[in-house]
């Protein structure tokens, strides 16, 4: 994982311009253009999207595959993680690997964070599995806005607290 940069714009716009991706995340428009990708990279670089947005890349060649990030909640003790991966890279373990790395980074570097939240669309079985493999526990369901669909969609909410993460780490489960 690394910061998104200008060299990612073509791959980003190509991978994100997929309804199967855009309709599963809350803030991605569809269609997704090269201008959208360039704006995303610029806003990320300027810190307008937050200080914790990463490109998910292949270790062996640096190829851009998707994005992940962390957004703080107003309470200062909770952050929410989010992620998406381009369809050619689905079902290969990349999202779980990125999510594990992000969770570990949050709990190791942010002592004030007590818990991490994650949400996924009810129909997104693959994302639910990623969340569960990272140790998150189901908290409830509700609605969340979808920019691509222009409406609210049913989502499930999960949480991982620091104590559970520490226990899972010590047991070797993560």
Image (spheres, rainbow, N blue to C red):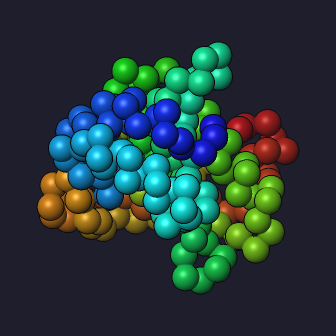
Q: Which residue is drawn at 70% across and 57% down?
A: 106
Q: How many marks?
A: 0
Q: Position of residue 30 (x, y in %)?
A: 19, 47
Examine the rendered structure and indicate whether residue 137 appears above or below residue 129.
below
Task: Give coordinates of residue 22: x percent, y percent.
Answer: 27, 45
Residue 58, placed above or below residue 23: above
Front position in the image: 130 or 39: 39
The x and y percentages for residue 134 are: 60, 44
> Residue 34 appears in which quarter of the rendering?
top left
- Specify whether 21 is left or right of 152: right
At horizontal 63% and vertical 40% (from top left) the residue drawn is 2
Q: Position of residue 25 (x, y in %)?
A: 33, 51
Determine whether, in the image, residue 61 is placed left or right of residue 151.
right
Residue sitting at x 71%, y 38% = 174
Q: Is residue 11 above or below residue 37?
A: above
Residue lying furthest right: 170
- Outermost residue to the bottom: 75
In-image side of 125 versus 148 (left or right): right
Q: Residue at x 41, y 52 (%)?
A: 40
Evaluate whether residue 100 shows in this view: no
Q: Tell me the quarter of the image containing the N terminus.
A: top right
Of the pair 118 and 147, the residue shown nearer to us: 147
């Amino acid at each position: 994982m690394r910061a998104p940069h200008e060299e990612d714009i073509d791959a980003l716009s190509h991978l994100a311009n997929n309804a199967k991706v855009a309709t599963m995340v809350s803030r991605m428009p569809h269609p997704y253009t090269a201008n959208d990708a360039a704006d995303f990279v610029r806003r990320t670089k300027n810190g307008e999207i937050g200080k914790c947005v990463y490109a998910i890349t292949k270790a062996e060649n640096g190829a851009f595959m998707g994005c992940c990030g962390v957004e703080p909640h107003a309470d200062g003790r909770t952050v929410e993680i989010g992620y998406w991966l381009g369809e050619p890279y689905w079902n290969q373990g990349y999202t779980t690997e990125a999510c594990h790395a992000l969770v570990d980074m949050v709990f190791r570097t942010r002592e004030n964070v007590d818990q991490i939240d994650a949400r996924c669309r009810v129909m997104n079985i693959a994302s639910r599995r990623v969340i569960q493999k990272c140790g998150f526990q189901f908290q409830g369901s509700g609605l969340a806005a979808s920019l691509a669909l222009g409406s609210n969609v049913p989502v499930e909410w999960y949480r991982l607290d620091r104590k559970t993460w520490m226990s899972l780490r010590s047991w070797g489960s993560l």
